[in-house]
Amino acid sequence: MAGGKLQAPRGTFDVLPQDGERREALREASDELLGLAGYAPFETPVFEDTEVFARGVGQSTDIVQKEMFTFEDKGGRSLTLRPEGTAGACRAYVEHGMHKLAQPVKLRYWGPFFRHEAPQAGRYRQFNQIGAEALGSDDPSLDAELILLLAELLADAEVECRLRLSSLGNAATRAAYGDELRTYLRSREDELSDEARGRIDANPLRAFDSDHESTRAVMAGAPLLVDRLDPADAEHFAEVRAFLDDAGQEYDLDPTLVRGLDYYTRTVFEFDSPALGAQSGVGGGGRYDGLVEQLGGPPTPGVGWAAGIERILLAGAPGEALGLPVAYVAVTAPDHRLTAFKITDALRGRGVKAQMEQAGRSMKGQLKQADRLGATHVVVVGEQIEVKDMDSGEQGPVADIHELLERVAL
Ligand code: HAM
């Protein structure tokens, strides 16, 4: 057959069987954690009208300007593979009249997202996020609850990280502050990088992100938004912090924290992990009190976060065995396979992870395979049935299936 070697597209990856279990364990842990806090499972399509992101994420962001996978469908509509989940969640909130439900509406999601970025370790073009959103209330306890849930999720996954926290105030304060910052940046325009200079009009805040040395020096003397918050926003931020302080959650107040999306108001936060190097953001989010309205809904506050699943797994501790018993059912000769099959099924019925020999191995090969699978017990099916405990090395016959299950199951 003609043709070159086929590979997964640039910036994408396959989840191989040996990596799948850690992902599944993370999913189960996060479902439980968020479920206990009332965040219901929720899904939106992986593509939306381009308009959802253009209006939601913001025209001046890198995401909308450079990173979206946008295409036309056969009817000439412009569609975009979702680069993030919040705009779609708000679109669904409006479309389904969720403002009529009891508020806040708490949602959680898990799935693939797409950004056309330069691939490197921890940065992909198709990646997965776990996210949580609470719509319909501006109660500062929600901001704190969400931050603490993400902190707990990351701690469970053994991700070493630090939390940066700030407040962006409201749209009017931001606009006035934007003017003040623009005036300041123009007064020192010569010292700025070309990129920062080019963004003075559209997005002056991004200058705080710059790696350019003299831009950084200019930004060190720049006015800060946290010093300009109006009293209600300052009070809201103080309340969020009081909840976090009371819970013993550590954070760094970082007035230069800039998130790459335009919809944020009030609280913003990000968890960074040194284990990730340049791509240090493992998860982040904030409040977006104007977004639902911007997408055509009634004025509705909202707050949430998303975290990169690959980044959590990259930065976290290598997965530990779950501590459940694992049984391997070996046969001394092929005519015992029927019994082995039945025993394997009975073990699974008792919550034991069990596999039988299915590749025609010799007894030696079967024991090696049991070892590879991390078996805690090997059941040897022959004229009689024996159970070997792999920890103690003890091996002995069992009288019947009941004794077998007692020996293997916890
Ligand atoms: P974000 O900070 O753009 O926020 O993305 C959240 C997380 O997704 C990042 O911290 C990172 O772990 C992961 N991530 C982003 N881009 C990539 C990539 N190219 N490769 C691998 N992982 C990536 C949002 O998406 C907001 N929707 C969060 C939010 C929810 N704000 C309020 N509600």
Image (cartoon, grey):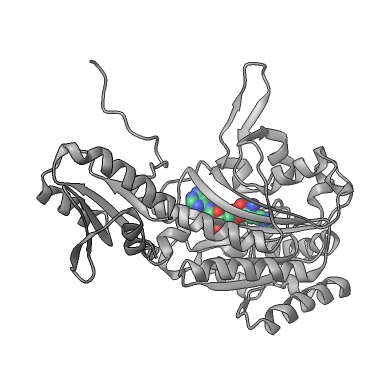
Q: Quadrant of the N terminus?
A: top left
As drawn, 292 above or below 184: above
Quarter in which the C terminus is drawn:
bottom left
The residue lying at 33 percent from left, 43 percent from top is: 342
164 or 342: nearer the viewer: 342
Horizontally, is 383 left or right of 78 in the view? left
Quadrant in the rendering for residue 223: bottom right
Q: Position of residue 106 (x, y in %)?
A: 74, 55
- 42 left or right, relative to 407: right
The residue lying toward the viewer, choosing from 57 and 91, is: 91
> Relative to residue 248, is residue 369 depicted above or below?
above
Res 199 visible: no
x 76%, y 41%: residue: 92
Q: Is residue 392 above or below residue 106?
A: below
Left-right relation of 315 to 71: left
Estimate the x, y position of residue 374 in percent, counting from the top left.
Answer: 27, 59
Where residue 409 appears, x then y in whole percent? 37, 61
On the picture, is 240 further left or further right than 403?
right
- Tally the numbered discs: 0
Q: Give the quadrant of ligand 1.
A: bottom right
Where is residue 323 drawn, in percent x and y? 38, 66
Q: Is residue 74 visible?
A: yes
Name the foreground residue: 352 vs 407.
Answer: 407
